[in-house]
Image (cartoon, rainbow, N blue to C red):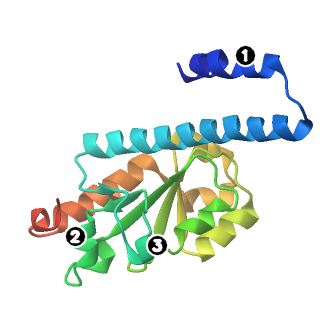
Amino acid sequence: IYRRIENESVLPVIKKGFNSVDDFIRYAHSVSNRRKSRTGRSLELNLETIFRDEKLYFEAQAVTENRKRPDFLFPSSKAYQDPLFPDNCLRLVAAKTTCKDRWRQVIDEAKRIEVKHLFTLQQGISTAQLKQMYESRVHLVVPEPYLSTYPLEWRAKILTLEKLTKTIRCEQDMIKDIKRWVV
């Protein structure tokens, strides 16, 4: 649907032409940025649906330190803000269609959470980048079929989405009175 709407609105502008290469480049960047934004938001909405279907407690776009807004905070911002809630039961999951250098944005999104999780659709990230991520305490999460595209020596360290949701569910099941901390 998006592509059809995009074709109907963008193609006439392209056919009309541009006065300069710079005008064309600006327009192309605008179209490309809108497309990336839609893709990223779509990924977040799909993950949100999965987390709800799995009956996990979480909050999307919860505010942490310095007005940072991680994509998903488990179980909630209320738990995150409460010093009595155990740090080891807090989880952060960021969603990025591709990692590139943007994975570094995740590092300081929630200071109480030692290990951050990054869900991505990017396949075959290099060993060097995986090492940097792991050393920065950012652990990768991918769809299970993508696991085979990663270096063999890293596959055991990369979580599948299924494993991550099971881990979070087990942690949340063990938290006494968890409903006290959820919205």
- Residue matched to label 2: 78
Q: Position of residue 90 (x, y in %)?
A: 32, 70
The residue drawn where x is 61% and y is 38% is 34
Please state which of the two labelled residues, at mark 3 or mark 2, is closer to the viewer.
2
Q: Are marks 1 and 3 in contact (CB under 8 Å)?
A: no
Crowdedness near tag 2: few (<14), some (14–19) or many (≥20) residues, C-alpha within 10 Å: some
Q: Amino acid at mark 1?
A: Pro
Question: Could you give the CA–CA distance between mark 1 and mark 3, rounded to whole angstroms?
Answer: 48 Å
Earlier in the chain: of badge 1 and badge 2, it is 1
Picture disc at residue 64 = none
* Residue type, numbered disc 3: Val
**Distance between the alpha carbons at the discs numbered 3 and 2:** 19 Å
Secondary structure of residue under mark 2: helix
Residue 75 image-quadrant placement:
bottom left
Considering depth in this image, is 36 or 8 the residue closer to the camera?
Answer: 8
Q: Is residue 105 left or right of residue 173?
A: right
What amino acid type should be assigned to the residue bearing mark 2?
A: Lys
* Residue under pointer 3: 115
Find residue 12 and name its label.
1
**Residue 46 in the image, given as x and y percentages of width and height:** 41, 38
Q: Earlier in the sequence, mark 1 or mark 3?
A: 1
In the displayed orientation, state which residue is furthest to the front.
19
- Residue 110 seen by the camera: no
Whole-number angstrom distance, CA of label 1 to CA of label 2: 49 Å
Q: Is residue 65 above or below residue 157?
A: below
Q: Residue at x 83, y 34 (%)?
A: 24
Can the viewer see residue 98 in this picture? yes
Q: Is residue 158 above or below residue 49?
A: below
Tag 1 secondary structure: helix
Return the residue found at the far bottom. 83
Q: Secondary structure at mark 3?
A: loop
Q: Tag 2 or tag 3, which sits nearer the N-term? A: 2
